[in-house]
Image (spheres, rainbow, N blue to C red):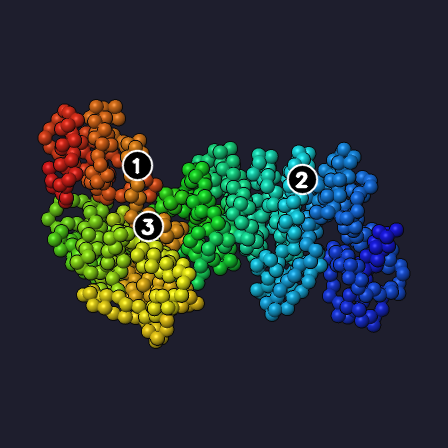
Amino acid sequence: MKRATAKHLIERYFRQLTDGCGNVDCTNELCASCCDFQPVDKNSAAVKALELYKMNAKLCEPRNRESDAADPDGSDKALRGFSGMMSSNDPFTSEEDVTDVHYLTEDSVSAIFKFCEEEGDYSAFIRVIGRVFSNAEALIQSFRKDACHVVHGDGKEETAAPGKNMGAAAILEGDTVQGLGSQDITVDIDAVRRVYDRLLSNEHLESALVNALVYLSPNLDLDLEFLDMYQTNRDYLNIFIIVMENTNLHSPEYLEVAMPLFCKAMSKLPAPAHARLSRLWSRYGSAHVRRMMETFQQLITFTIVSNEYDGANLVNDDETVVAATKCLKLVYYASILGGDPDVEHNEEEVEDSESDELTLHELLGEERLYRKGPRVDLLEKELGVRTVDCRRPVIPFEDFINEPLNEVVEMDKDFTFYKVDAESKFSFQSCPFILNAVTKNQGLYYDNRIRMYSERRITAFYSMAQGQQPNPYLKLKVRRDHIIDDALVRLEMISMENPSDLKKQLFVEFEGEQGVDEGGVSKEFFQLVLEEIFNPDIGMFTYDHESRLFWFNSSSLENEAQYTLIGIVLGLAIYNNCILDVHFPMVVYRKLMGKKGTYLDLADSHPLLYQTLKQLLEYSGNVKEDMMITFQISQTDLFGNPITYDLKEEGEEIPVTNVNKEEFVELYAEYVLNKSVERQFKAFKKGFLMVTNESPLKYLFRPEEVELLICGSRNLDFEALQETTEYDGGYTKDCQVIKDFWETIHSFGEEQKRLFLQFTTGTDRAPVGGLGKLKMIIAKNGSDTDRLPTSHTCFNALLLPEYSSKEKLRERLLKAITYAKGFGML
């Protein structure tokens, strides 16, 4: 009797919200007849009616009694869900009661479980799950919070009833939901997780979940593509939140059919919805974020290993892989947001001056191929966070790399999609987190080569138009004994007169030496330039013996042009695919990617200072009395003379205390890493960007990967090198001299192995991906002789005579690699 009365009152509230009382002069703001009433849809009215019943709100007396009659096509449909609500705390007594449930709560699930256990039959529950989890509207209304406290940007609070549609117009910019950061989520996530724990323990119920998801997903796809459902109802996102809480989505039952369809639908959510999901998931904790990451990764891997891809059947055209990658992107940014993001300490961007004149590429109709950088990442823009903003994400960056995908992606085709056909084709370079450094380096290589080809075309065009001698390459002719003067003066002239020449392919010639530059001469050129530049006697950089790293000398007497030219050299090395032997701390690459140095960066750039400041932060005593330090610091200049600097105005008079020690540390790091070397680093970065400003480098690579591009890897796996080495001139891997050669190489010490690598390839570092990517060639160079082995560093080729003994081979090889320098040595 009590339940019947309650239901009757709730129905009257519902009629009041949908039809009104019929009184044109009604003053009840909770009645549709009132002039101030805001209309609501019937589903929202049904849930609002329950809330009004709980509040014992004002109830109008309807003038038209017939309005209480049921509307079989409208009102009654919305009211059917009341059976589920009213049954939350009351046990079900018949299968008909269970059948009347049209959306779920934690209490109703518990009640249904109890009923089915008593009956020993779960068929009714299976039908409920199939009905609710296959219906978008039912899922939207399921597992609602009792109340959602929304705090608006103006500080006012609003309590939304369960099921209330917080439409886009109702949510102000900056709205927050208590306990969920910036999310206005109406799902009781904890309740959803507890329900899944019970549902997934029953094999028959899980099968119903799989089937329901298969039926639901195509409808979601159509809703989002043609009806734009999220724009009309922001609670539409509840469907994806609820489904993704299923901890069994990675199992084969889901991966084969259900998840591909669901990911396709999720990928069609608009950027604001994707941003809401990322922000919500960022608060879940590492275990939940990792589970979702692994779900999408397994779907990608499962799909790739189940299919074959080639030039005609590209992985880019596989809808499942593409959709899962787009969904994985949401988890990737959730990992960044949930980690340790820093969106504040950013370097000032160097803006290029835009010209109103048409470029040659625009005249030729090629402006899409040569545009500066990729299109804007809508999700990144919506979230206001970049990869470089986070040092320690919830899930390590490396875990998002999918190796099976990297093995099948055709980077030449993918690069074309990325640069030209982004509107119609998907490129994995738009989701670079899933690619490893080797694959991304291939994309960068294509970009660099196309730009080099473009510069040659432009040069030929102008030469024909103006009758000038074409100069399609960036040629540097230098003297070995004056390499810095010759190279830097020439580069300075080019950077001032025609900076675009820096994007031509580099050719280096050493005066007086017969060596055609097919890459090897350039490698030696870079090596010799860096040896000179980083010589501590020059004073442009300081060297830390503990960390074995170089840092900008704030007291250097060299002008900005010298640092600009060093930046050009680093940019040219990347542009021409050369590995350099440079030793910078990671903060240099972070600053090149747009971030300022902070206290944490001192750990590798200035380890002794970092330890000192760390001890200050951890000191539990009285800092002011025990340490007696102020906001004025002291350093020495190039000649060893002391200089002071105030971290704050009148810093000498401001003592460091337990209260302001964090500020002192922050300002100290700001001075050491940014302000004190601002002049030098700005010039250095300017030179670097002269070569790389139009490259996708900044968008594809993290700072750690940029260092790998420039410096290569110091981990030398000669076993991998042996596996990939090719033989020519009559040699095979089974020849005795080849067996003796590899036994000799493996017996070398670390330094001797580096000398051999330097002798054969022009650098003692492994390329991106390790020595296995080097593809060295060993060619036969005659029969037994006293001549030394020689090499073509341009092609990573070693010319090895067929020595008569292992001892002779070792002696000749060691002599060659120890004393080799320049061309012409026999």
Question: Quick check: 124 above or below 334?
Answer: above
Disc 3: which residue: 707
Q: Circle 3 sits in a helix, a strand or a loop, which is it?
A: helix
Image quadrant holding the C terminus, namely top left
| Residue 131 falls left or right of residue 340 | right
Q: Toward the viewer: 236 or 546?
A: 546
- Quote the CA–CA distance across marks 2 and 3: 49 Å
Pointers 2 and 3 in contact (C-beta within 8 Å): no
Mark 2, mark 3: which one is toward the viewer? 2
Q: Toward the viewer: 740 or 787?
A: 740
Residue 578 percent coordinates (x, y): 27, 47
**Disc with the residue nearer the chain's start (3 vs 1):** 3
Disc 2: which residue: 199
Q: Mark 1 Cα within 10 Å, few/some/many (few <14, many 20+)?
A: few
Picture disc at residue 717: 1
Residue 326 seen from this side: no
| Residue 223 falls left or right of residue 346 | right
Kindly identify the residue that appears in the image at 86 percent across and 54 percent down: 5
Q: Circle 1 sits in a helix, a strand or a loop, which is it?
A: loop
Residue 178 percent coordinates (x, y): 61, 60
Identity of the amino acid at label 3? Answer: Glu
Figure quadrant of residue 500:
bottom left
**Disc with the residue nearer the chain's start (2 vs 1):** 2
